[in-house]
Image (tube, rainbow, N blue to C red):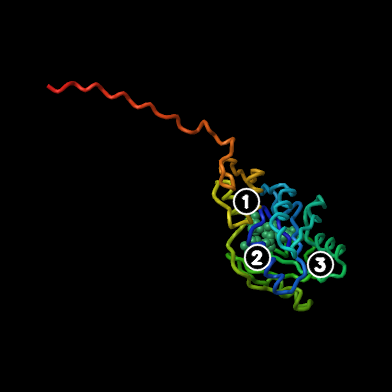
Amino acid sequence: MMGGTFDPIHHGHLVAASEVAHRFGLDEVIFVPTGQPWQKEGANVSPAEDRYLMTVIATASNPRFSVSRVDVDRGKKTYTVDTLRDIRAQHPEAELYFITGADALSSILSWQDWEELFDLANFVGVSRPGFELRIDHLQNYLGNYPPEALTLIEIPALAISSTECRLRASENAPVWYLVPDGVVQYISKRHLYGSRDGARSDGSVAMSAPVASVPAPVEPEPEPQRKAAK
Ligand SMILES: Nc1ncnc2c1ncn2[C@@H]1O[C@H](COP(=O)(O)OP(=O)(O)OP(=O)(O)O)[C@@H](O)[C@H]1O
Ligand SMILES: O=C(O)c1ccc[n+]([C@@H]2O[C@H](COP(=O)([O-])O)[C@@H](O)[C@H]2O)c1
């Protein structure tokens, strides 16, 4: 499974999930959008339903990808320890892997009840441009676990972040090819991140485009009467 705020989901997330599924021979990757990401409090996170729907849209075409509502529906701060318990209850026979990017992995010691996490799932840390994929901070602790408790892998590097996508949308810069096409259209339709209606994702001009801002034709100044040449 792969947890994230997915505000919005982008191709960096999808490549990470696809690559881990391939390398570990996983049957399914469950994307789990956060309900209330407590470490992003005050960061003006979009409504959980919008993030959930964007995740559904982005993953719909892949038969091995699915989306879980466990964190969205819990209605409390999202702790991965709860996510793992809920997914375990739904899939008692499955061997669970939790996918994290290098940045998320580096802050794992700040997560709620982090000591329990490695009993509930194997963790896969994936490379991410701009972040070091290191586990020095976990090394002592992981000595008690089998090697598969945490694996680090290099994946194709995509320097994309949700923060950058939100910024671009707010400036009406294109997010095409950074996020799946359906997510571009959803952002535009719901006016997420302050994106304007005038610059629609499908390239058409909205009827509500500010027609009044089209400059009125300027009347040409009357030519001054020329004096007849003597
Ligand atoms: N480009 C990427 N490559 C690899 N892993 C990524 C990438 N982007 C995000 N991840 C990982 O995906 C998970 C969910 O990330 P999240 O939804 O917070 O996206 P984000 O791009 O980091 O968002 P933000 O910029 O808002 O912090 C995290 O484990 C994160 O490390
Ligand atoms: O369990 C925690 O306390 C905890 C704290 C911060 C982040 N996480 C999880 O890490 C994943 C990535 O989170 P984020 O905030 O970077 O989108 C997501 O599944 C979060 O629920 C978990």
Q: Are marks 3 and 1 in contact (CB under 8 Å)?
A: no
Q: Amino acid at mark 2?
A: Val
Q: Are marks 2 and 3 in contact (CB under 8 Å)?
A: no
Q: Residue at x 76, y 60 (%)?
A: 66
Residue pointed to by mark 1: 184
Q: Amino acid at mark 1?
A: Val
Residue 103 in view here: no
Q: Amino acid at mark 3?
A: Glu
Report the side of 218 relative to 196 (left or right).
Answer: left
Crowd rating for badge 2 (residues with CA inside 10 Å; few <14, some 14–19, many 20+): some
> Looking at the image, is mark 3 or mark 1 earlier in the sequence?
3
Mark 3 lies on a secondary structure that is helix
Crowd rating for badge 1 (residues with CA inside 10 Å; few <14, some 14–19, many 20+): many
Residue pointed to by mark 2: 15
Q: Residue at x 60, y 44 (%)?
A: 195
Q: Residue at x 63, y 62 (%)?
A: 12
Residue 142 in view here: yes
Residue pointed to by mark 3: 116
